Image: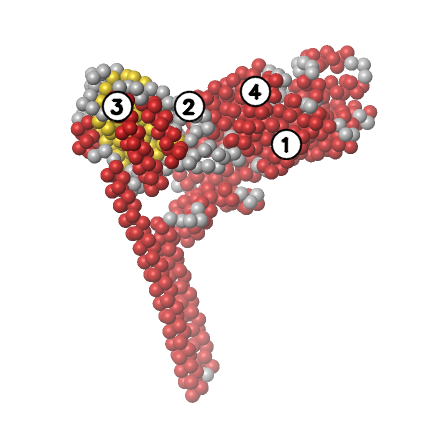
Amino acid sequence: MKNLIVFSFLILTSFNILAQMSSRADSLQKLIDKEKTDTGRIVLSYRLAYELQYSDPEKSELITRQALEESEKLNFPKGTGNSKIQLGNLELIKGNNETATQFYLEALDILTKANIKEGITVCYNNLGIIAHNTNDYSGANEYYRKSLAINRELGRKSGEATALYCLGTVFENQAKYDSALKYYYEAQAISETIPDERLIAYGKSSLANVYFTMKNYPKAMEYYRAAISLFEASGNKYGSLKMYISLGQTAAEMDSSETAIDYYDKALKISVGIESLNDEAMINYLMAQLLEYQGDLESARPKYEKACSIYKSIDSKDNIVLALVALARLKNLSYEFRAAEKYLEEAETIAREINSVGSGVDIYRELSMSYTGLKDFKKAFYYLNRYSELKDSLMNVEKQKQILELQTQYETEKKEKENELLRKDRKILQTTRNSLIIGALLLALIIIVVLRSLMIKKRDNRILKEQKEEINRQKEIVESQKTSITDSIKYARRIQSAMLTPDESVNNYLPDSFVLYLPRDIVSGDFYWLKKLNEKMVLVCVADCTGHGVPGAFMSMLGMSLLNDIISVKHTLIINNDFRLSDILNELRERVKSSLRQTGKEGEARDGMDLSMCLIDREAGLLRYSGANNSVYIVTNGTLTELKATRNPIGIYLNEISFTDHSFEPGPESMVYMFSDGYSDQIGKGGTKFLSKNFKKLLSEISSRSTSEIREILHKKHLDWRNDEEQVDDILVLGFRL
């Protein structure tokens, strides 16, 4: 599901008096009671309806319709237009996009004819929100810019800030984060100048989304909680709803499943209370997704079904496809392949209708699994091919070989069936001719038929021979290419292995230690590196580079080369503690950025590495540590202590900060573990990850054993957990006893 923060409650700029007077419903009601003019009561009424739209939507609609009826009787275009805007707002909150659009277009026509620009800009902004919510980014951008231009012309700061926030969200949803931040910061500055607490709250939530995308989840949590405090203080239930959803998503990313479910439950209660069907569906989907991730398929299914039912009721076709694919996935996992097939056929029909190419990848993948389970290999092959074409037009050599073998088998079976039909046809023809032709004519015709049959057979044999030769030729080419590529990668492994610290050096520097090194492919994006500075000091480094296989191996060799260069130059300074571990990481980051020519421009590759570095200072009796996203665990007497890393990678980063140093005085027999994320991210038989909490528990239980036993237990636990699943990432665990 998209983390879409285009709040339909950004319609707060509907009426310019909101920036000039109290927005409290009771204050407006008192003004209505005192107002003597009909038009004045109408204006105050739809403003009161606006204030009640989240807390009491039924009363809000009743007041708005009364204002609309009075406006039409008095031929009061401003009242008519703004009343229709408010009716559109109420429909938008419910998720009825089509009805809301109709109200906004009617209001725009009325207000344009009367040249009431304040109302026109609100119509443009709200039409932009609807286009945005239906993934029409081009249309949304056009509407928001029209709204922004009119607000600037009128000097309406709140409207200007609202349009800027909306534009920022368009760029955020398109993954253009630099442009999104530009609009968010500009809008935030205006919001704080006015000041407007509602807009400030939207600003905090928007910045939280950017931190969420950057995977800085603690910072995202901080901003989401700040925003929800402002929304709850103002009684904005819709704002609180959106923040609880975002908090749930963030908690899920932090592996805090119980916390995530708690936030989702709060959001669900609000969505039902304010009749926001789109949000109710999305929350059910997110909860189901989390339960599926935990392996609880039975609990996930009814929530997916609920989400699908609601999306169908509001005709949200792209989300209907998502829900149908999710239900099919559960059916496939439960071996109910026919049921999965029905869900996927419905999803495919809708995806074609809305031209959703991205959805096709998931649909075809699941259809391939369904037909494989049903042993309909012809269809399984067809949908596997469709999936591969959509996912990546440049298939790797192994997939080419598999598809070629399936295609050869299919074509051979097809040709055999055609030959069988041809033989039957000839037999019928010969029988018919034998019954009609007599004497010499019969003999002549038989000879002709035989000659013709021989010619056809000879032609068919020639065609089959040519096809077989072509298939064998293609097979040889593919096998030759595979052998050549594999040989090259194996040679690259020799080069990479030569750059890694040799086993005898590891045992010499760290006598009581082990290394569990399991590349996913032939070469690895993980590496370990040790350097003996003097008789009392040893540097130890474990790194996880972007990607795996050949790309990851290139990054690992770059990292080792740069580390060797830095340590060689700064050797004496490091020994004297004049050049700390954090300084090494800071310089390594700058050198990686320079080597990869990273400038932070939008669309630029953001390759780099996560890394942990320890300095064993035996003379001082200390373990010094600094890390880039990679923590270090120390287990003493069964108690695990985590030295946490700086939340920055070695490479370009949007929110770049300096790395920090830690010192730890280990106890007797303390066991230190340095690792990449491959061990805890491994998928098990039930489709769930091993998770860091289980990794910590395992290390706490086995650290009293010898290092060779620890390595053996870790390896066996990984294989048992993985079962028949493929290894998903490179795995590296380095442990040593102090």
Q: Which amino acid, by three-letter code, is at mark 4?
A: Ala
| N-term mark: 1 or 3 | 1
Name the residue: 79% across, 20% down: 39
The residue wearing badge 3 is: 572
Q: Position of residue 135 (x, y in %)?
A: 57, 37
| N-term mark: 1 or 4 | 1
Q: Are marks 1 and 3 in contact (CB under 8 Å)?
A: no
Q: Nearer the viewer, mark 2 or mark 3?
A: 3
Q: CA distance from mark 2 to mark 1?
A: 34 Å
Q: Quadrant of residue 74?
A: top right
**Position of 155 compared to 231: left or right?**
right
Q: Are marks 2 and 3 in contact (CB under 8 Å)?
A: no
Q: Quadrant of residue 678?
A: top left
The residue wearing badge 2 is: 657
Residue 546 or 230: which is nearer the viewer?
Answer: 546
Q: Residue furthest bottom?
A: 440
Q: Position of residue 310 (x, y in %)?
A: 56, 33
The residue wearing badge 1 is: 144
Q: Position of residue 77 (x, y in %)?
A: 78, 27
| N-term mark: 2 or 3 | 3
Name the residue: 41% across, 51% down: 381
Q: Position of residue 626 (x, y in %)?
A: 33, 22
